Image: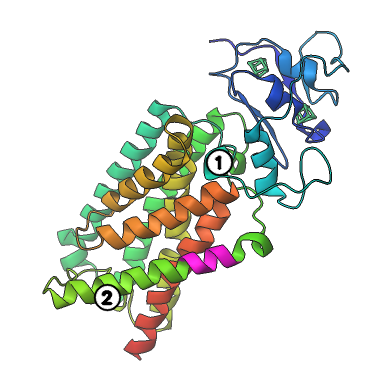
Amino acid sequence: MARPALSLAPQRCDKCMRCLRACGRRAIDVGAAFVFVDWDRCDGCGKCAAACEAGAIRMRGGPPPARSEASVGPAPARLEAAVAAERPSASVAGDERVKAPRLEDIAPLAPAWTAWEVAVVLAGVLALFVAQQAALGSKWMADVVPIGAKPLVRSGVLALYYAAQLALLAALGYRKGVGFAEAFGLRRFRPLAFGASVVALVAVTRAFTLAYAVGAESLGWKMPAGPASDLTLYFGRDGLGLALTVVMIVVVGPFFEELVFRGVLAGFLQESMGAWPAVVVSALVFAAFHANGWMFAPVAVMGLGCAWAALRTRSLWAAYVLHMLYNAVPVFLIFALAK
Ligand code: SF4
Ligand code: SF4
């Protein structure tokens, strides 16, 4: 389908949000540094261009944007919540303070992903995961790679796995016509407003994991042996092993998992099912992707926390920080106890 004749100039946008109110098809999103139009939803009606006094959205070759607000109605709750999520002490109307928004009223985390794009991402990541697991468990890895080189080779395999994911995600994000950050909800996150909530979620999810591990152990259900059960066997227990573990398990891995399971999947479900179903379903899919029955419950609970943080703050960074801290706790405990 040909793109409607809209011309976007995000640098002119003053964040008045009139275009969101004017667009009956929910095809527009406006953030700190972007104006996004979902071309699959847009029918080219031009109401957004007519509402945009700043000239950030214009009809190509059309008249200058209208200065009148006649066609623009009152701010919807969704818009007020979008502003409140980013600036809780401000309001759309002026000095009046806005109450904390309900999760359902907060604007979407990311530009609307389509079902087939989500399917491509999940299928692609699953295929890459299977290939990565096959390489790590291969005879070549067991018999040919020298013991001393195994940590570096394993890290190289993981690096290729993440590089392939980056290529897939960047290609799909490029189709959106916005930058990589905007495509995945990597918006500015205000640590002073939400930092305490993120730290509290780390504590709650880690406490659940500890209680779960103790309970499972008492019932005779031990965590299966493998990389997740002892990272020092996998990456080595020296300084290099700690560095590789931190890079792969604390820094890089969580970033890609957040892009896929919150930036794409939760963002898509938020638009198609609503915010709370998106939090629950994305967490369950996230846990299932770990392909480890013992870890399903704790990973799902951590996924709930990450999805909530991402949708509540409209920023993937909040979920990423939570995920990093959650992973960092066992990494540093394991290496400290291994000394
Ligand atoms: S042209 Fe119409 S449908 Fe398209 S973004 Fe603007 S208001 Fe929405
Ligand atoms: S109407 Fe124009 S200036 Fe206002 S938020 Fe939309 S794009 Fe920005």
State whether label 2 is within 8 Å of ligand 2.
Answer: no
Question: In this orientation, which residue lies closer to the viewer: 148 or 301?
Answer: 301
Name the spot of residue 260 as percent of width and height, x first.
Answer: 43, 45
Contact (CB < 8 A) between labels 1 and 2? no
Q: Secondary structure at mark 1?
A: loop
Residue at 31 percent of width and 62 percent of height: 298
Q: Secondary structure at mark 2?
A: loop
Q: Quadrant of ligand 1?
A: top right
Question: In this orientation, which residue lies closer to the viewer: 267 or 289?
Answer: 267
Specify the quadrant that holds the C terminus.
bottom left
The answer to whether residue 333 is magenta is no
N-terminal-most mark, 1 or 2: 1
Residue at 55 percent of width and 18 percent of height: 41
Name the spot of residue 130 as percent of width and height, x first.
Answer: 24, 48
Name the spot of residue 288 as percent of width and height, x first.
Answer: 26, 50
For disc 2, the marked residue is 230
Q: Nearer the viewer, mark 1 or mark 2?
A: 1
Q: Residues within 10 Å of mark 2 (few under 14, many from 20)?
A: some
Q: What span is colored magenta in the figure?
A: 196-201
Mark 1 vs mark 2, CA separation in Å: 35 Å
Which amino acid, by three-letter code, is at mark 2? Answer: Asp
Query: Would residue 48 be found to the left or right of residue 280 on screen?
Result: right
